[in-house]
Image: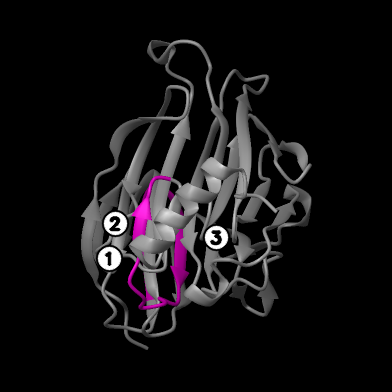
Amino acid sequence: MKNRTISQIIEPQLVMEGAGVLLRRSISPRASNEQDPFLLFDHFAFNNPLEGPLRGFPMHPHRGIETVTYMLDGVTSHRDSLGNSGEIGPGDVQWMTSGRGILHEEMPRRSTSGNIYGFQLWVNLPAAQKMSQPRYQEVNASTIPVVEKDGVTIRLVAGEVNGVNGPVTEIAASPLYMDVKLTPGSTFTHPIPRGHTTLAYVFEGVGEFSGEAVESVGMVVFNDDGDQLEVKSDAGVRFMLIAGAPFKEPIVPYGPFVMNTVEEIQQAIADLRSGNFVK
């Protein structure tokens, strides 16, 4: 099998979102759609006192995408226009398919350590599913499989590793989403289908990705020139591995909406204003 090579390494940019939340953003929705089917990746933490009072994401709309929240520390309370509510804590995942439209709120709360830490990924929906019924897949940390071998520990949210399947299923992009940790001196290899977009967000330590050293924090974008990924580390490294099948459709992003045409964006705005956004 041939190892994929690196296309680029993206240095996350600090941005403010919601009610003043400081984020490290690696990718964001663009009409050019370079990371199809992935639209956005945010690394959030509320642990710097200079950020001021703890804030969050008050009620806001989504249409045409899936939002994936993965918590490492702290708790996020959520509620939505469909009557759902709850909390996701350390190790938990919420995979929300917004479909034709949902209004939801996400408000963070510090853990006993005083920290909040996690990631949010946006995954596109194909045109045929953009107006589908909204749904949630909420995954408790205890139900996420942990695969350990030769100094590598994997928490598997979606996809398959050595015959083990992640709990998130029936996603159009056929995604791979996993939290991978290498102890010093270990090596990780994993097959990736040719044609699938592949990203690795390095958030702890330093690793050698396809022969190139990458330090935290940074988003590694891989070329589609191989059928497996190889990572080595002398000192230890931890990263989120993200891969999926591109839809190869034009997109029009507009804030929390990602549709295929300008007219569909205009309809989303009209539905929101008229009160017909949520059904």
- The residue nearer to you, when weighing 123 against 7, is 123
Q: Is residue 102 above or below residue 39?
A: above
Q: Are marks 1 and 3 in contact (CB under 8 Å)?
A: no
Quarter occupied by the N terminus: bottom left
Q: CA distance from mark 1 to mark 2?
A: 8 Å
> What residue sits right under mark 3 in the picture?
178
Task: Identify the residue under disc 2.
Answer: 30
Q: Nearer the viewer, residue 62 or 96?
A: 62
- Mark found first going from the N terminus, 3 or 2: 2
Left or right of residue 261: residue 241 = right
- Segment tinted magenta in the rendering: 229-255
Query: Looking at the image, do the residues carrying marks 1 and 2 touch, with CB atoms under 8 Å apart?
Result: yes
Can you name the residue that lies furthest to the bottom here? 1
Indicate whether residue 237 is drawn in magenta.
Answer: yes
Q: Along the horizontal axis of the image, is 200 left or right of 61?
A: left
Quickly name the residue at label 1: 34
Crowd around label 2: few <14 · some 14–19 · many ≥20 (10 Å): some
Give the residue drawn at x 29%, y 56%: 30
